[in-house]
């Protein structure tokens, strides 16, 4: 810029005491024209300034050329300013369009996550990143999908997604990749958002103090729960079950209303629930409770021989005494007919209010212990046989299609452990050692 300014000053005012000899004038003028035609305006003006220095007597010709050059520069400057305004306007319009487009893409991604269609999200995430708008909202979706892939042992897909935000330097063959991804996500994600994802994809367990007893009207006996335990705040949802299904390569069947991430996982038989318990125990560094051997295939499913390690500290299904004790509110019970209320509509989904399907967990009121959906939504498997020598397993709580009477905390029912249906799910407990 300083060179250009100096050139213009010399061009218009010249320098005193210059020689009148002009052996280089024509050459300098030709070079000035060449630079001008090539769009190298600063170099062209420098040539005119040099010509004025050597040939002050020809300043008239130089003034004419200088005027032509500077006039053209002014015109091009005005055009450039106008083009910049047009470009700025176009950029602002594009940014506004991007701001409007990104929520549409994100809503589509959210639907894929809700329907468990994670593999459909990569292209949409790439589009959202390319739109360069609402960055934090885009990051949250990518983080969630990467978190799911990491926990579902699909680490290559997690890396591919994170690379959309910034290069990680990792590949599918990187040693200890799953641990690296977990560490990266733990350091990168805001703590409250990481906690949200952990509760979405793993069951939240709430404490139940033992040392209580209650009258079981159908057994006509007093049942006691001596040990304290932790029980799932909700039934296992499809979001939680899908992590296991991908990691264990376990097939899951969608209900007629399709997968919904925050709905209880259905079409899960007793053995499916036991396999999930063992997988979650291993994932959290606990001992597996169930040993399932000698699979026998039938027309309706596969049955296993089952041994239960009563000394293991891992996750398991509740006994029906534990289930009913928790459903009644434990030692904080108010003696209510259903879990949390004597009016079923306020705490449960059943045949008269469910619209013939499961509903999202935690939409109804919780009971005295903070537990949701223990009355209605889906029947829940228990650890016990229904009666001595009788092969059906106990399930409790009623479901979306049940009569109100079947959703009472005291009501007992049973089902073959190898059967799957869209009204049966489960929730977990573990007993602290």
Image (spheres, rainbow, N blue to C red):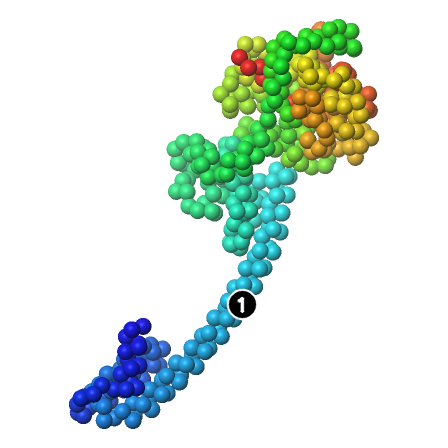
Q: Taking 21 as reference, is 140 left or right?
A: right
Residue 272 lies in what quarter of the image?
Answer: top right
Q: Check the image and report above or below for 203 versus 80.
A: above
Residue 312 visible at all: yes
Q: Residue at x 44, y 47 (%)?
A: 166
Q: Taking 188 as reference, is 236 left or right?
A: right
Q: Position of residue 334 (x, y in %)?
A: 74, 18
Residue 296 visible at all: no
Q: Quadrant of the N terminus?
A: bottom left
Task: Quickly name the residue at label 1.
Answer: 89
Front residue of this view, candidates 296 and 172:
172
Residue 228 lies in what quarter of the image?
Answer: top right
Q: Residue at x 19, y 91 (%)?
A: 22
Q: Residue at x 54, y 9 (%)?
A: 311
Q: Position of residue 44 (x, y in %)?
A: 30, 80
Q: Taking 77 as reference, is 15 left or right?
A: left
Q: Position of residue 40 (x, y in %)?
A: 33, 77
SS state under label 1: helix
Front residue of this view, candidates 351 and 276:
351
Q: Taking 201 as reference, is 375 left or right?
A: right
Q: How many marks?
A: 1
Residue 430 lies in what quarter of the image?
Answer: top right
Q: Residue at x 55, y 27 (%)?
A: 248
Front residue of this view, candidates 254 and 20:
20
Q: Check the image and report above or below for 353 versus 222.
A: below
Q: Check the image and report above or below for 329 versus 135.
A: above
């Amino acid at each position: 810029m300083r060179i250009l300014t100096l050139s213009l000053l010399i061009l218009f005012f010249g320098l005193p005491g210059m020689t009148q000899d002009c052996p280089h004038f024509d050459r300098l003028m030709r070079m000035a024209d060449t630079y001008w035609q090539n769009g190298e305006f600063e170099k062209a003006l420098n040539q005119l300034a040099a010509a004025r220095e050597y040939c002050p007597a020809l300043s008239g010709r130089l003034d004419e050329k200088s005027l032509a050059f500077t006039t053209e520069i002014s015109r091009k400057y005005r055009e450039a300013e106008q083009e910049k305004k047009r470009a700025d306007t176009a950029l602002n319009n594009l940014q506004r369009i991007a701001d409007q487009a990104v929520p549409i893409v994100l809503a589509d991604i959210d639907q894929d996550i809700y329907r468990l269609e994670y593999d459909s999200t990569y292209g949409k995430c790439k589009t959202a990143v390319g739109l360069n708008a609402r960055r934090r909202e885009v990051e949250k979706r990518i983080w969630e999908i990467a978190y799911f892939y990491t926990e579902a042992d699909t680490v290559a897909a997690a890396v591919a997604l994170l690379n959309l935000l910034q290069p990680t330097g990792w590949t599918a063959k990187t040693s200890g990749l799953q641990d690296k991804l977990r560490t990266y996500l733990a350091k990168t994600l805001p703590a409250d958002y990481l906690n949200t994802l952990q509760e979405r994809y793993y069951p939240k367990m709430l404490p139940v103090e033992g040392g209580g007893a209650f009258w079981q009207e159908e057994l006509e006996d007093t049942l006691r729960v001596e040990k304290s335990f932790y029980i799932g705040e909700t039934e296992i949802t499809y979001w939680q079950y899908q992590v296991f299904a991908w990691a264990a390569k376990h097939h899951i069947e969608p209900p007629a209303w399709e997968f919904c991430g925050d709905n209880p996982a259905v079409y899960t038989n007793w053995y499916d629930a036991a396999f999930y318990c063992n997988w979650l125990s291993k994932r959290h560094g606990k001992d597996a409770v169930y040993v399932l051997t000698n699979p026998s295939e039938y027309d309706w499913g596969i049955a296993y021989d089952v041994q239960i390690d009563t000394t293991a500290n891992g996750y398991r299904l509740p006994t029906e005494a534990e289930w009913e004790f928790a459903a009644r509110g434990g030692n904080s019970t108010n003696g209510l007919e259903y879990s949390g209320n004597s009016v079923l509509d306020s705490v449960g989904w059943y045949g008269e209010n469910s619209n013939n399907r499961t509903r999202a967990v935690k939409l109804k009121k919780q009971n005295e212990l903070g537990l949701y959906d223990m009355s209605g939504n889906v029947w829940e498997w228990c650890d016990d046989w229904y009666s001595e020598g009788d092969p059906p397993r106990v399930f409790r709580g009623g479901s979306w299609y049940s009569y109100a009477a079947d959703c009472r905390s005291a009501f007992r029912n049973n089902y073959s452990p190898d059967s799957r249906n869209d009204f049966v799910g489960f929730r977990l407990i573990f007993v602290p050692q």
